[in-house]
Image (spheres, grey):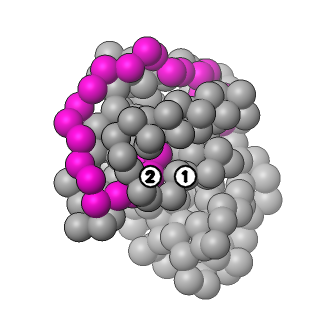
């Protein structure tokens, strides 16, 4: 794990645990998003390749000692790298002007859902973190936000091997505060 001190994150912005596509896959996702943006007539700004991610848990609402406890739990987590695959795009119903257009999937995301359950179980062993695993989880990669909404549409699968977990502070960019390689 990269060293981490929660006190560095208590500024504005968001704090979350995520998985990231590798650089090549990020570029591929971004190129596909450019094509789909034009095809669907979206006007929203594309998510930059270096900001593409799947959020597993938001930690921004937690006090510093609970964030540190979450990091300690992750330090002890044992999990093998696994593959994920997204095979459709769709719009989520958000606020007008801020509706996420995302990569989604079903079968190719089963390993990710299982990993998140293991992570939730590890976090639940720490005081004040049990509630994290109770939230719904719809794995997705946000490509852009827009007024326009499109229904679910299949695409050729886009996937990668998840090799680590990252703690991200998001505020005018993404700062990676810690990362944990997956290992058994």
Q: Label 1 neighbourhood size at 10 Å, few (<14), some (14-19), many (20+)?
A: some
In the image, is residue 146 part of the stretch drawn in magenta?
yes
Relative to 4, 38 lies left or right: left
- Provide the residue designation for mark 2: 144
- The mark nearer the N terminus, 1 or 2, is 1
- Give yes or no for residue 162 being in the magenta stretch: yes
The residue lying at 27 percent from left, 53 percent from top is: 148
- What is the x, y in percent for residue 45? 51, 58
Q: In this view, does 159 lie above or below 53?
A: above
Residue in the foreground of this view, choosing between 23 and 111: 23
Q: Which residue is drawn at 66% across and 65% down?
A: 173
Prevailing secondary structure class for the magenta stretch in the rendered image: strand
Quadrant in which the C terminus is drawn: top right
Q: Which mark is residue 109?
A: none
For mark 1, give the secondary structure. loop
Q: In this view, does 173 lie above or below 90?
A: below
Which numbered tag is attached to residue 47?
Answer: 1
Magenta residues, start to end:
141-164
Are the two marked residues, 1 and 2, in contact with CB atoms closer than 8 angstroms? yes
Residue 93 picture quarter: bottom left
Please provide percent x and percent y for residue 179: 70, 48
Q: Can residue 126 be seen in this view?
A: no
Please, is residue 35 above or below residue 55 in the view? above
From this view, report whether residue 62 is shown above or below residue 153: below
> Residue at (34%, 32%) from the top-left corner?
89
Q: Where is residue 27 in the image (x, y as percent from the top left)?
A: 67, 34
């Amino acid at each position: 794990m990269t060293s981490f001190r929660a006190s560095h994150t208590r500024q504005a912005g968001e704090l979350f645990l995520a998985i990231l596509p590798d650089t090549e896959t990020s570029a591929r996702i971004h190129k596909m998003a450019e094509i789909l943006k034009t095809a669907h007539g979206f006007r929203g700004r594309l998510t930059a390749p270096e900001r593409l991610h799947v959020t597993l848990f938001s930690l921004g609402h937690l006090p510093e000692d609970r964030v540190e406890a979450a990091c300690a739990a992750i330090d002890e987590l044992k999990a093998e790298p696994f593959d994920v695959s997204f095979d459709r795009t769709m719009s989520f119903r958000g606020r007008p002007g801020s509706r996420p257009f995302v990569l989604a999937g079903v079968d190719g995301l089963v390993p990710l859902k299982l990993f998140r359950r293991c992570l939730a179980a590890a976090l639940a062993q720490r005081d004040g973190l049990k509630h994290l695993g109770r939230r719904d989880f719809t794995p997705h990669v946000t490509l852009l936000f827009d007024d326009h909404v499109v229904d679910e549409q299949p695409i050729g699968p886009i996937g990668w091997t998840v090799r680590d977990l990252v703690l991200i502070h998001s505020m005018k960019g993404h700062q990676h505060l810690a990362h944990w390689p997956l290992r058994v």
